[in-house]
Image (cartoon, grey):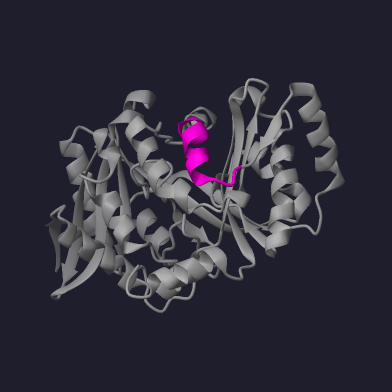
Amino acid sequence: MVEIKKVSPTRKELKKFTEFHINFYKGNPYFVPPLLIDEVDTLSPDKNPAFDFCEAEYFMAWKDGKPVGRIAAIINHQVNEASGEKAARFGFVEFTDDKEVSGALLNTVEDWARAKGMEKLIGPLSFTDLDKEGCLIEGFDQLSTMATIYNYPYYQEHFEHHGYTKESDWVEFLIEVPDKVPEKHLRIAEIVKKKFGLKVVKYTSRKKIKKEYGKALFHLINEAYKDLYQFSRLTDRQIDKYIDEYLGLLDLDLVTLITDTDDQIVGVGISMPSMSRGLQKSHGKFLPMGWWHLLKGLKGKNDRVDLLLVAVRPDYQSKGVNALLFVDLIPQYIRKGFKYAESNPEMETNDKVQNQWEAFNPRQHKRRRSFVKQLK
């Protein structure tokens, strides 16, 4: 018999909730663990500013005295207000290959959502669109990234067995880094610069980029991503958190800003050396030696770069701004020895984004899905 226990949102209990996830994939060569302290902070109401507009509860499944699964029940009220829907989310979901276990976890969240007046349940999703999302349904033999979920192949069959159907798909591409910038991109970049007076802006000081464009960068993301599936607009508190936590980690050679004649930001490309192998070696822990493996991932020899985000202001989309980003970033990739780039998840319907990879021998190597169930 499966027993479902509610998880208290204390750091001690959330650590156990996260450690179950990491241990669940122990020895899997494709799983990339989260950094434990970061995941606990994401789940903590007192640490994650998304709780200004989200509510959540966490549950673990036990069978024969052993933990066999976990799940989070989430409502993002900001997204519901924007969409007019009454939708709850499930996320942070793991379970053994036992339909009694997966069913008990999903039923618990469904009952919770109904009690909150919700009419449908979607997942796997997290609190916001910048968190990890989507059940992996293709690419189980591909190394995961720090920004994505890895799960066992049986998950899809379990969701469908319990009455869930496809809501939306994301695809991911492995892209070859060319040995030089394509002539087409060089030509388009020159035309765009002259036509619109755009400039490529680079920084060597983290303090300076934070001060001059930190907030503007995330406001640009809000505008560029506002029409994407289940996008949750970043609040000022979230922006402050991301500025403090993430801008300081970036290799500024791999951050490119595009500004107009008024020095307003109209485009940004942010990439990062793959942290997958470093996170695997750290086992999700910063101490005692996890920091060393993570530092090697950032500074050491690495043939993969993660394309964390590309954002272009809506009034400049489809006008060649991406060519400016490529012309600046490709030489950096070549200089640093990157052979491949990971696109990370893109909506399968987002042709504009996928078309930009055509010149780089892209291979779609992963697909992930969100599932939905109507609650009656």
Residue 205 among magenta residues: yes
Quadrant location of residue 237?
top left
Q: Quadrant of the N terminus?
A: bottom left
Q: What residue appears at the point 33 percent right and 75 percent down from the top-left corner?
A: 288
* Residue plotted at (59% across, 24% down): 264
- Judge whether residue 27 is colored magenta: no
When the figure is inspected, residue 208 is found, relative to residue 17, above or below; the finding is above
Residue furthest to the bottom in view is 27
Vertical arrangement, residue 222 with respect to residue 337, above or below = above
* 263 to the left or right of 75: right
Q: Position of residue 36 (x, y in %)?
A: 31, 63
Q: Is residue 167 visible?
A: yes
Q: Tell me where residue 179 appears, x and y as whole percent.
A: 80, 59
Q: Is residue 38 left or right of residue 2?
A: right
Residues shaded magenta: 203-216
Rendered location of residue 49, percent (x, y): 28, 39
Nearest to the observer: residue 78 or residue 50: 50
Find residue 175 and report its image quarter. Answer: bottom right
